Amino acid sequence: MMDLNLVRVFTAIYETRSVSGAAARLFITQPSASYALARLRQETNDALFKRSRAGMEPTPTAVQLYKVFKKSLTGIEKAVANTRTFTPATSRHKFRLALSDLGELLLLPRLVAGLRDVAPGIQLEVVAIDAIRLNEWLLTGKIDAAICNRNASVSSAQRELILYERYVCLLNDRHPRISNRLSLEEYMQEKHVVVAATSGHHIVEDRLKEFGLERDIALEVPHFAALGELIASSELLVTLPSAAAKIYLSRRNGRLFELPFQVPDQEVFIYAHTEIGDISAKTWFYNFLKDASPAMMDP
Protein backbone atom coordinates (compact mmCIF):
# COMPACT_ATOMS: atom_id res chain seq x y z
CA MET A 1 0.00 0.00 0.00
CA MET A 2 1.29 3.45 -0.94
CA ASP A 3 2.28 5.68 2.00
CA LEU A 4 -0.17 8.60 2.15
CA ASN A 5 2.67 11.01 2.94
CA LEU A 6 4.38 10.01 -0.30
CA VAL A 7 1.16 10.73 -2.18
CA ARG A 8 1.03 14.19 -0.61
CA VAL A 9 4.62 14.91 -1.64
CA PHE A 10 4.02 13.64 -5.18
CA THR A 11 0.90 15.79 -5.56
CA ALA A 12 2.67 18.86 -4.20
CA ILE A 13 5.63 18.42 -6.55
CA TYR A 14 3.27 17.90 -9.50
CA GLU A 15 1.31 21.07 -8.75
CA THR A 16 4.20 23.34 -7.79
CA ARG A 17 6.65 21.85 -10.34
CA SER A 18 9.26 22.15 -7.62
CA VAL A 19 10.69 19.99 -4.83
CA SER A 20 11.39 23.10 -2.73
CA GLY A 21 7.88 24.41 -3.46
CA ALA A 22 6.38 21.10 -2.34
CA ALA A 23 8.47 21.19 0.84
CA ALA A 24 7.28 24.74 1.58
CA ARG A 25 3.64 23.78 1.08
CA LEU A 26 3.90 20.70 3.29
CA PHE A 27 6.07 22.36 5.96
CA ILE A 28 8.84 19.79 5.58
CA THR A 29 12.52 20.17 4.71
CA GLN A 30 13.70 19.98 1.12
CA PRO A 31 15.83 16.88 1.84
CA SER A 32 12.70 15.18 3.21
CA ALA A 33 10.80 15.99 0.01
CA SER A 34 13.73 14.75 -2.11
CA TYR A 35 13.87 11.52 -0.09
CA ALA A 36 10.12 10.99 -0.58
CA LEU A 37 10.53 11.51 -4.33
CA ALA A 38 13.35 8.95 -4.40
CA ARG A 39 11.09 6.43 -2.64
CA LEU A 40 8.29 7.13 -5.10
CA ARG A 41 10.61 6.58 -8.03
CA GLN A 42 11.69 3.27 -6.56
CA GLU A 43 8.12 2.11 -5.90
CA THR A 44 6.84 3.12 -9.36
CA ASN A 45 10.02 2.22 -11.28
CA ASP A 46 9.73 5.54 -13.11
CA ALA A 47 11.60 8.87 -12.99
CA LEU A 48 8.20 10.62 -12.50
CA PHE A 49 9.72 14.10 -13.00
CA LYS A 50 12.48 15.51 -15.18
CA ARG A 51 14.15 18.85 -14.57
CA SER A 52 13.63 21.57 -17.17
CA ARG A 53 13.76 25.34 -17.37
CA ALA A 54 10.07 25.39 -16.51
CA GLY A 55 10.60 23.26 -13.40
CA MET A 56 9.94 19.59 -12.67
CA GLU A 57 8.13 18.27 -15.74
CA PRO A 58 6.03 15.11 -15.13
CA THR A 59 6.55 11.96 -17.14
CA PRO A 60 3.54 10.26 -18.78
CA THR A 61 3.40 7.86 -15.81
CA ALA A 62 3.30 10.80 -13.40
CA VAL A 63 0.46 12.40 -15.35
CA GLN A 64 -1.60 9.23 -15.01
CA LEU A 65 -0.75 8.80 -11.34
CA TYR A 66 -1.68 12.41 -10.57
CA LYS A 67 -5.22 11.95 -11.88
CA VAL A 68 -5.76 9.06 -9.47
CA PHE A 69 -3.76 10.43 -6.52
CA LYS A 70 -5.36 13.89 -6.64
CA LYS A 71 -8.90 12.56 -6.61
CA SER A 72 -8.15 10.13 -3.78
CA LEU A 73 -6.16 12.63 -1.71
CA THR A 74 -8.83 15.32 -2.04
CA GLY A 75 -11.49 12.85 -0.93
CA ILE A 76 -9.46 11.78 2.11
CA GLU A 77 -8.60 15.34 3.16
CA LYS A 78 -12.19 16.52 2.76
CA ALA A 79 -13.41 13.58 4.83
CA VAL A 80 -10.94 14.52 7.57
CA ALA A 81 -11.90 18.19 7.30
CA ASN A 82 -15.56 17.29 7.79
CA THR A 83 -14.68 15.87 11.20
CA ARG A 84 -13.29 19.23 12.26
CA THR A 85 -15.27 22.33 13.11
CA PHE A 86 -13.92 25.76 12.24
CA THR A 87 -15.54 28.32 14.51
CA PRO A 88 -14.67 31.83 13.28
CA ALA A 89 -16.16 33.54 16.33
CA THR A 90 -13.52 31.98 18.60
CA SER A 91 -10.71 31.08 16.19
CA ARG A 92 -7.22 32.58 16.41
CA HIS A 93 -6.29 31.35 12.93
CA LYS A 94 -3.97 33.49 10.80
CA PHE A 95 -4.78 34.06 7.14
CA ARG A 96 -2.52 35.58 4.48
CA LEU A 97 -4.19 37.62 1.76
CA ALA A 98 -2.40 39.06 -1.28
CA LEU A 99 -3.60 42.52 -2.32
CA SER A 100 -2.31 45.32 -4.50
CA ASP A 101 -1.94 48.72 -2.86
CA LEU A 102 -5.18 49.66 -4.66
CA GLY A 103 -6.81 46.68 -3.00
CA GLU A 104 -5.53 47.92 0.34
CA LEU A 105 -6.93 51.37 -0.39
CA LEU A 106 -10.32 50.27 -1.70
CA LEU A 107 -11.08 46.96 0.00
CA LEU A 108 -9.06 46.48 3.15
CA PRO A 109 -10.87 48.85 5.55
CA ARG A 110 -14.28 47.21 5.01
CA LEU A 111 -12.75 43.76 4.88
CA VAL A 112 -11.17 44.28 8.30
CA ALA A 113 -14.43 45.66 9.66
CA GLY A 114 -16.26 42.57 8.41
CA LEU A 115 -13.74 40.27 10.07
CA ARG A 116 -14.04 42.12 13.36
CA ASP A 117 -17.80 41.51 13.30
CA VAL A 118 -17.78 37.77 12.63
CA ALA A 119 -14.27 36.63 13.63
CA PRO A 120 -12.70 39.09 16.08
CA GLY A 121 -9.83 36.75 16.98
CA ILE A 122 -8.74 36.07 13.41
CA GLN A 123 -5.31 37.40 12.39
CA LEU A 124 -4.95 38.79 8.88
CA GLU A 125 -1.60 39.35 7.18
CA VAL A 126 -1.71 41.34 3.95
CA VAL A 127 1.02 40.52 1.41
CA ALA A 128 1.90 42.90 -1.43
CA ILE A 129 0.81 41.12 -4.56
CA ASP A 130 3.28 39.96 -7.20
CA ALA A 131 1.32 39.04 -10.33
CA ILE A 132 4.25 37.05 -11.72
CA ARG A 133 4.59 34.80 -8.65
CA LEU A 134 0.91 34.59 -7.72
CA ASN A 135 0.36 31.05 -8.97
CA GLU A 136 3.44 29.81 -7.08
CA TRP A 137 2.29 31.54 -3.89
CA LEU A 138 -1.17 29.96 -4.06
CA LEU A 139 0.17 26.49 -4.84
CA THR A 140 2.84 26.49 -2.13
CA GLY A 141 0.52 27.91 0.53
CA LYS A 142 2.50 31.15 0.96
CA ILE A 143 -0.88 32.88 0.78
CA ASP A 144 -4.39 31.64 1.49
CA ALA A 145 -6.12 33.86 -1.08
CA ALA A 146 -5.62 36.80 -3.41
CA ILE A 147 -7.84 39.56 -4.73
CA CYS A 148 -6.53 40.94 -8.02
CA ASN A 149 -7.05 41.41 -11.74
CA ARG A 150 -7.56 38.30 -13.86
CA ASN A 151 -4.26 36.39 -13.87
CA ALA A 152 -3.82 33.90 -16.69
CA SER A 153 -0.90 32.20 -14.93
CA VAL A 154 -3.07 30.97 -12.05
CA SER A 155 -3.87 27.30 -12.63
CA SER A 156 -6.72 25.25 -11.19
CA ALA A 157 -7.51 27.62 -8.31
CA GLN A 158 -11.03 28.39 -7.19
CA ARG A 159 -12.00 31.89 -8.30
CA GLU A 160 -14.88 34.31 -7.92
CA LEU A 161 -15.46 37.39 -10.08
CA ILE A 162 -16.24 40.30 -7.76
CA LEU A 163 -16.09 43.45 -9.90
CA TYR A 164 -15.08 45.14 -13.12
CA GLU A 165 -12.57 47.99 -13.17
CA ARG A 166 -13.01 50.83 -15.69
CA TYR A 167 -9.85 52.74 -16.54
CA VAL A 168 -9.73 56.54 -16.72
CA CYS A 169 -7.07 59.26 -16.92
CA LEU A 170 -6.17 61.56 -14.01
CA LEU A 171 -4.23 64.78 -14.49
CA ASN A 172 -3.41 68.09 -12.85
CA ASP A 173 -6.27 70.60 -12.40
CA ARG A 174 -4.06 73.28 -13.93
CA HIS A 175 -2.52 71.24 -16.72
CA PRO A 176 -1.21 73.82 -19.22
CA ARG A 177 -2.03 71.91 -22.43
CA ILE A 178 -5.23 69.98 -21.72
CA SER A 179 -8.47 71.86 -21.04
CA ASN A 180 -11.99 70.45 -21.37
CA ARG A 181 -11.40 67.22 -23.28
CA LEU A 182 -8.63 64.72 -23.87
CA SER A 183 -7.90 63.61 -27.42
CA LEU A 184 -5.82 60.60 -28.40
CA GLU A 185 -3.22 62.93 -29.91
CA GLU A 186 -2.94 64.88 -26.64
CA TYR A 187 -2.81 61.69 -24.62
CA MET A 188 0.09 60.34 -26.69
CA GLN A 189 1.99 63.64 -26.70
CA GLU A 190 2.08 63.91 -22.91
CA LYS A 191 4.43 62.16 -20.51
CA HIS A 192 3.00 59.46 -18.26
CA VAL A 193 3.57 57.80 -14.92
CA VAL A 194 2.89 54.06 -14.77
CA VAL A 195 2.76 51.43 -12.05
CA ALA A 196 5.07 48.40 -12.33
CA ALA A 197 3.67 45.40 -14.24
CA THR A 198 4.03 43.18 -11.16
CA SER A 199 0.93 44.95 -9.79
CA GLY A 200 -1.09 43.32 -12.58
CA HIS A 201 -2.14 46.65 -14.13
CA HIS A 202 -0.75 46.41 -17.67
CA ILE A 203 -3.90 46.26 -19.80
CA VAL A 204 -3.55 49.86 -21.04
CA GLU A 205 -0.05 49.18 -22.36
CA ASP A 206 -1.29 45.98 -24.02
CA ARG A 207 -4.18 47.84 -25.66
CA LEU A 208 -1.98 50.64 -27.03
CA LYS A 209 0.41 48.09 -28.51
CA GLU A 210 -2.53 46.68 -30.49
CA PHE A 211 -2.84 50.14 -32.08
CA GLY A 212 0.92 50.32 -32.71
CA LEU A 213 1.27 53.04 -30.08
CA GLU A 214 3.62 53.46 -27.14
CA ARG A 215 3.32 55.99 -24.35
CA ASP A 216 6.17 58.31 -23.33
CA ILE A 217 6.88 56.97 -19.83
CA ALA A 218 8.58 59.52 -17.60
CA LEU A 219 8.21 57.65 -14.32
CA GLU A 220 7.52 54.09 -13.18
CA VAL A 221 6.53 53.52 -9.56
CA PRO A 222 5.93 50.27 -7.63
CA HIS A 223 2.60 51.33 -6.13
CA PHE A 224 -0.43 53.56 -6.73
CA ALA A 225 -0.27 55.11 -3.26
CA ALA A 226 1.67 58.29 -4.12
CA LEU A 227 -0.01 59.04 -7.45
CA GLY A 228 -2.52 61.60 -6.22
CA GLU A 229 0.03 63.98 -4.78
CA LEU A 230 2.33 63.34 -7.74
CA ILE A 231 -0.34 64.31 -10.27
CA ALA A 232 -1.29 67.39 -8.26
CA SER A 233 2.28 68.66 -8.42
CA SER A 234 3.28 67.74 -12.00
CA GLU A 235 2.11 67.64 -15.61
CA LEU A 236 2.28 63.85 -15.82
CA LEU A 237 -0.78 61.77 -16.79
CA VAL A 238 -1.76 58.61 -14.96
CA THR A 239 -4.20 55.97 -16.21
CA LEU A 240 -5.83 54.01 -13.41
CA PRO A 241 -9.07 52.33 -12.27
CA SER A 242 -11.94 54.76 -11.80
CA ALA A 243 -12.59 53.73 -8.18
CA ALA A 244 -9.07 54.81 -7.21
CA ALA A 245 -9.28 57.96 -9.33
CA LYS A 246 -12.44 59.02 -7.50
CA ILE A 247 -10.64 58.75 -4.16
CA TYR A 248 -7.90 61.04 -5.46
CA LEU A 249 -10.56 63.42 -6.81
CA SER A 250 -12.16 63.59 -3.37
CA ARG A 251 -8.76 64.70 -2.07
CA ARG A 252 -8.58 67.35 -4.80
CA ASN A 253 -5.54 65.75 -6.38
CA GLY A 254 -6.61 66.38 -9.99
CA ARG A 255 -9.37 65.96 -12.57
CA LEU A 256 -10.67 62.94 -14.37
CA PHE A 257 -11.05 62.27 -18.11
CA GLU A 258 -12.41 59.33 -20.01
CA LEU A 259 -9.75 57.60 -22.08
CA PRO A 260 -9.69 58.60 -25.78
CA PHE A 261 -9.54 54.93 -26.81
CA GLN A 262 -11.39 51.77 -25.84
CA VAL A 263 -9.94 49.63 -23.03
CA PRO A 264 -11.84 46.54 -21.88
CA ASP A 265 -12.97 46.61 -18.28
CA GLN A 266 -10.63 44.60 -16.07
CA GLU A 267 -12.09 41.64 -14.21
CA VAL A 268 -11.15 41.39 -10.54
CA PHE A 269 -11.22 37.94 -8.93
CA ILE A 270 -10.76 36.24 -5.61
CA TYR A 271 -8.33 33.34 -6.03
CA ALA A 272 -7.69 30.50 -3.58
CA HIS A 273 -6.78 26.80 -3.34
CA THR A 274 -9.12 25.70 -0.59
CA GLU A 275 -7.99 22.07 -0.83
CA ILE A 276 -4.40 22.96 0.13
CA GLY A 277 -3.59 23.20 3.85
CA ASP A 278 -6.33 23.54 6.46
CA ILE A 279 -9.37 22.87 4.29
CA SER A 280 -11.98 23.92 6.86
CA ALA A 281 -10.30 27.24 7.62
CA LYS A 282 -9.43 28.10 4.01
CA THR A 283 -12.92 27.25 2.78
CA TRP A 284 -14.41 29.53 5.42
CA PHE A 285 -12.03 32.36 4.47
CA TYR A 286 -12.74 32.00 0.75
CA ASN A 287 -16.50 32.04 1.36
CA PHE A 288 -16.12 35.02 3.69
CA LEU A 289 -14.31 36.97 0.96
CA LYS A 290 -17.01 36.05 -1.57
CA ASP A 291 -19.84 37.06 0.77
CA ALA A 292 -18.07 40.25 1.86
CA SER A 293 -17.25 41.42 -1.66
CA PRO A 294 -20.58 43.17 -2.42
CA ALA A 295 -20.28 45.16 0.81
CA MET A 296 -16.67 46.02 0.04
CA MET A 297 -17.71 47.39 -3.33
CA ASP A 298 -20.39 49.73 -1.95
CA PRO A 299 -19.57 53.41 -2.43
Image: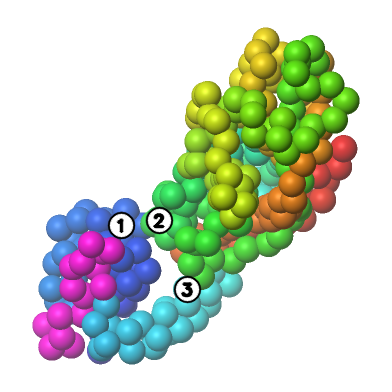
For residue 169, the mark is: none
Corner quadrant of residue 111: top right
Q: Is residue 87 visible?
A: no
Residue at mark 2 to residue at mark 1: CA–CA distance: 8 Å
Q: Which residues are magenta?
A: 41-57
- Where does the N terminus fall, quadrant-wise? bottom left
Corner quadrant of residue 11: bottom left
The residue that label 1 is drawn on is 21
Residue at mark 1 to residue at mark 3: CA–CA distance: 20 Å
Question: As shown in the figure, which amino acid type bears the numbered disc 2?
Answer: Glu
Image location of residue 78, percent across then percent down: 53, 74
Corner quadrant of residue 173: top right
Residue at mark 2 to residue at mark 3: CA–CA distance: 21 Å
Image location of residue 54, percent across then percent down: 28, 63
Mark 3 surroundings: few (<14), some (14-19) or many (≥20) residues within 10 A? some
Question: As shown in the figure, which amino acid type bears the numbered disc 3?
Answer: Glu
The residue that label 3 is drawn on is 77
Image location of residue 137, percent across then percent down: 43, 52
Give SS at disc 3. Answer: helix
> Is 10 above or below relative to 255?
below
Residue drawn where x is 21% and y is 75% of the image: 49
Q: Nearer the viewer, mark 2 or mark 1?
A: 2
The residue that label 2 is drawn on is 136
Mark 2 touching mark 1, by CB under 8 A? yes
Of callouts 1 and 3, the N-terminal one: 1
Give SS at disc 2. Answer: helix
Tell me: 24 left or right of 88. left
Of callouts 2 and 1, the N-terminal one: 1
Residue drawn where x is 50% and y is 36% of the image: 196
Residue drawn where x is 65% and y is 13% of the image: 234
